Image (cartoon, helix red, strand yellow):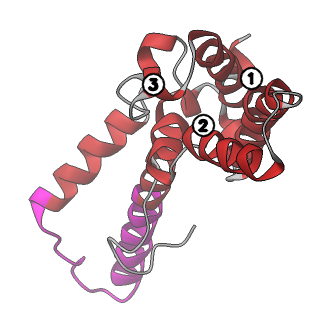
Amino acid sequence: MKILDAGTEPLSNVDVLRWIKAKREQHAAEDKDDRKANRKPTQRPQNFLDALEKHERVLESNAYPYTNNPDSYNNYKAMEELDNKIVDRIISPLNESYRGSGMTAEELEKTLGKEHEAKSLTETEHLMIYNHAPKAVEMLQPMIENVEERFTAEEQETLVEAIKETYRQSEK
C-alpha cells in the first residue's frame, strides 16, 4: 500500500513498518545524492528521526505476529481468507440451525440478516486482529466489540482457531 496522505486510510502495523523502512531508504538515497554533488546532507528534525527509530524498533519486535509469520502478511489476502473462514465456520452453520424452525421465509431472512451482521467483523476489528493475531479467547475482548454478546463461547474458540490458522501459520 502506498501512503499518499496521512490519515486517509487505516494502516496496519505492517504498513507503518514498511513506510518507515521506505522513508529510511529515501533518506539514505537523498544523502548519497547530496554527497555525490558535494553538498552537505539534508538536515532532518532529530525528533522525527528518533520517532522513526523508536517505532521501527517496537514494530520489529517479536511481540507482533508478522515478525514470525511474514508469509501471512505479504498482502491483505489473509484478511479475506479469515473472512471466508468466519463465514464457513460460524455464519453458515447458523443458516442450518434456523432451517425447519417454523419461521416464514421473511422472518428467517430478517433473523439471519441480524445474526450475520452481528457475527461479521468491522474494519477496525479486522485491523486489530490483523495486527495482533490473538492466540486466546481472552485476547478477543479488547479487539472485538461486545464479543461475548455477539459470539458464543464455542464460536469464540472457532474464531481464535481460524485466526491462528490464518495469521500464525509458521508457529504451529
User: Which residue is drawn at the image coordinates 35% and 27% (left, top)?
Assistant: 142
The answer, for residue 63, to whether it is visible in the render is no
Q: Residues within 10 Å of mark 1 (few under 14, many from 20)?
A: some
Element under disc 1: helix
Would residue 42 appear left or right of 119 to someone viewing this image? left
Magenta span covers which residues? 20-47
Which tag, 3 or 1, sits closer to the chain's start?
Answer: 3
C-beta proximity under 8 Å, tags 2 and 1: no
Element under disc 2: helix
Q: Residues within 10 Å of mark 2 (few under 14, many from 20)?
A: some
- Residue pointed to by mark 2: 119
Q: Main secondary structure of the magenta part?
A: helix
Q: Quadrant of the C terminus?
A: top right
Would residue 9 appear left or right of 120 to someone viewing this image? left
Does the magenta-highlighted stretch encompass residue 50? no
Residue 164: percent from left, percent from top: 67, 20
Q: Of tags 2 and 1, which is closer to the observer?
A: 2
Residue 140: percent from left, percent from top: 46, 22
Q: Amino acid at mark 1?
A: Glu
C-beta proximity under 8 Å, tags 3 and 1: no
User: Which residue is drawn at the image coordinates 33% and 36% (left, top)?
Assistant: 57
- Residue pointed to by mark 1: 165
> How far, Cα to Cα, is label 3 from label 2?
10 Å
Would residue 45 appear left or right of 6 to someone viewing this image? left
Q: Amino acid at mark 3?
A: Glu
- Residue pointed to by mark 3: 149
> How far, Cα to Cα, is label 3 from label 1?
24 Å
Toward the viewer: 131 or 35? 131
Does the magenta-highlighted stretch encompass residue 27? yes
Q: Amino acid at mark 2?
A: Lys
Toward the viewer: 161 or 61? 161
Q: Residue furthest bottom?
A: 37
